[in-house]
Amino acid sequence: MGEGDGAGFQPPQKQEQEQWMERALTMAKEALENGEVPVGCLMVYRNEILGQGRNEVNETKNATRHAEMVAIDQVLKWCHQKGRDRKEVFEHTVLYVTVEPCIMCAAALRLLNIPLVVYGCQNERFGGCGSVLNISQDDLLYTGTPFQCLGGYRAEEAVELLKTFYKAENPNAPKSKARKKH
Ligand SMILES: [Zn+2]
């Protein structure tokens, strides 16, 4: 029973999922401490972390450097260094991320054929797994393959981090321009 998707992908046990989410949350906190949108993520391939990222948009001044993109680049680098087939690797990689991937990242995950995303809270502004668009599951013939999503892990903590960040970003706050740290 439970043939999966035919590619031999086994979804992780719940306990395992919780462990990885703990680490993703730690990365999100690190993002917050560095003045970034607090999102953290891990890419786990057969029980091994191949990539981990946190949002780096402000630091890099590049709006595409979301946590997922940072982690994807690390996995690609790993595949290159180890001479591994990136298709096989991504097809067996689970993404753990504290916030629902945005539309851009959800499309990237489809193009890489990632089978499963475990996430924390919803992304009300830009969510690509149901909140704004449903990139994860929609019938998009030429954009990779749909992926499964399991949301709600440690969602309250993930939301709390976002609230803390956006409170500090409030344009009415008198010193919103005093954020640069160097
Ligand atoms: Zn994103």
Image: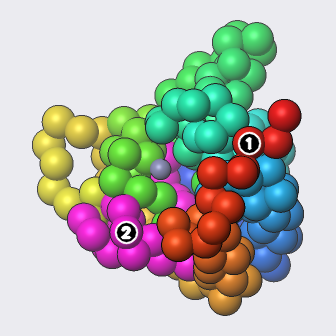
Magenta span: helix, strand or loop, mainly?
loop
Question: Residue 52 versus residue 10: which sits nearer the camera?
Answer: 52
Question: Residue 179 versus residue 83: which sits nearer the camera?
Answer: 179
Q: Is any atom of residue 60 visible in this view?
A: yes
Q: Residue at x 84, y 34 (%)?
A: 182
Identity of the amino acid at label 1? Lys
Rendered view: 71 above or below 164: above
Q: Residue furthest bottom?
A: 156
Q: Secondary structure at mark 1?
A: loop
Whole-percent x, y for residue 46 in the image: 75, 47
**Residue 38 marker:** none
Instruction: Tell me how the rendering is colored.
Output: rainbow
Identity of the amino acid at label 2? Arg
**Residue 180 marker:** 1
Marks 1 and 2: in contact by CB < 8 Å?
A: no
Whole-percent x, y for residue 127 in the image: 38, 65
Whole-percent x, y for residue 28 in the image: 75, 61
User: For the magenta stretch, what is the residue range?
Assistant: 114-133
Residue 97 found in image quarter = bottom right
Q: Nearer the viewer, mark 2 or mark 1?
A: 1
Report if residue 62 lies within the magenta region: no
Q: Residue at x 24, y 39 (%)?
A: 143
Label 1, ligand 1: CB separation under 8 Å? no
Q: Residue at x 39, y 51 (%)?
A: 106
Rendered view: 155 above or below 123: below
Q: Which residue is mark 2?
A: 125
